[in-house]
Amino acid sequence: MVERIVLVLVTLLAGYWGLGSMLSWAARRSWRELSSLGPLLSRVLPLLMITVLFCFYNAEIWQVAAQLSMQRTWAAFAVMGLLGVALAVVNTRDELQRVIHHHHEDLDHDEHPLQRAERFSVLLVSVMVTLIPVTLLAVVVFCFFVAFGQLSVSAETAKQWIGAAPAKFDGPLAPLPITRPLVQVCLMLSAFCSLSFIATAGVDPAYRAAFVEPILDEVRDNLDVRDAYLEARRSEPTP
């Protein structure tokens, strides 16, 4: 009974907050972002590979990964993911405050101030737009290093690094031809690449122009549409 009550409450809150619409929008946006994945990879991957390849061929990271269970690996991956989300929120909040401030200055009045819920909605949408290509980047980096590691790191080399034969997966994943340490290392490197990309996009002018400014332009357009909508609602004749 308690689980059913909690499930009903969560469903009602999700409907009230519009999480279904937000998730469907995120799915459509992710599909659209796939078209820009090529330019993203061409800008990001060459710089990241210079650093990440040294980590990938480092025996210490393989030794650390081999000593971790998959649960602790996912926990470490989640911590780095939360750090990335927090960094994206901080960077996006600062940028949005400047955009909103300039928007009100351009209007020369404050007839339609943004409410707290509206500010949160703008921040949430902007953060999600930022994180969607970052997530796609993490998936591509993970798949690349899994394939690259399967090709370039033999079982004998992994055994020398780890000190024992690399463990295989159990259960339904047992037929996979990849080892568990390889997947764990690739998970850590993909999380590191995503976190590094978020940090770089917030300060590097080239990254800002390519990935941050388009998001801010969308926010400016949305603010203009909101003001026009509220102005039209206010000018409607009352029945």
Image: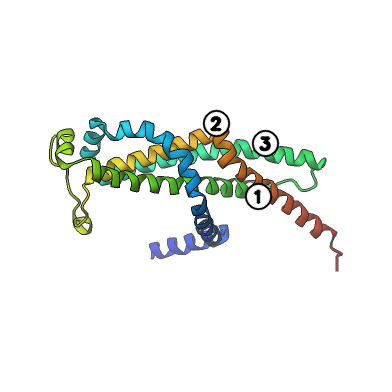
User: Which of the labelled discs sits on residue 118, or is there none?
Assistant: 1
96 shown above or below 54: below
125 shown above or below 1: above
Task: Residue 58: name its quadrant.
Answer: top left
With 100 as the anchor, is 29 left or right in this view? left
Of mark 3 and mark 1, the one earlier in the sequence is 3
The amino acid marked with disc number 3 is Arg
With 170 as the anchor, is 35 left or right in this view? right
**How many tags in the picture?**
3
Q: Closer to the camera, 114 or 104?
A: 104
User: Which of the labelled discs sits on residue 28, or is there none?
Assistant: none
Q: Is residue 113 visible?
A: yes
Q: Closer to the camera, 107 or 50?
A: 50
The amino acid marked with disc number 2 is Val
Q: Closer to the camera, 188 or 89?
A: 188
Q: Secondary structure at mark 3?
A: helix
Residue bearing the label numbered 2: 203
Q: Position of residue 95 (x, y in %)?
A: 62, 37
* Pair 3/1: label in front: 3
Q: CA distance from mark 3 to mark 2?
A: 15 Å
Q: Position of residue 46 (x, y in %)?
A: 42, 36
Q: Is residue 69 visible?
A: no
Q: CA distance from mark 3 to mark 1?
A: 16 Å
- Do the numbered discs 2 and 1 sit on residues whose CB atoms are within 8 Å? no
Q: Secondary structure at mark 2?
A: helix
Q: Going 50% across and 55% down the picture, which residue do you hit?
A: 30
- Do the numbered discs 3 and 1 sit on residues whose CB atoms are within 8 Å? no
Q: Closer to the camera, 212 or 50?
A: 50
Residue bearing the label numbered 3: 98
Q: Secondary structure at mark 1?
A: helix
Task: Residue 184: name its quadrant.
Answer: top left
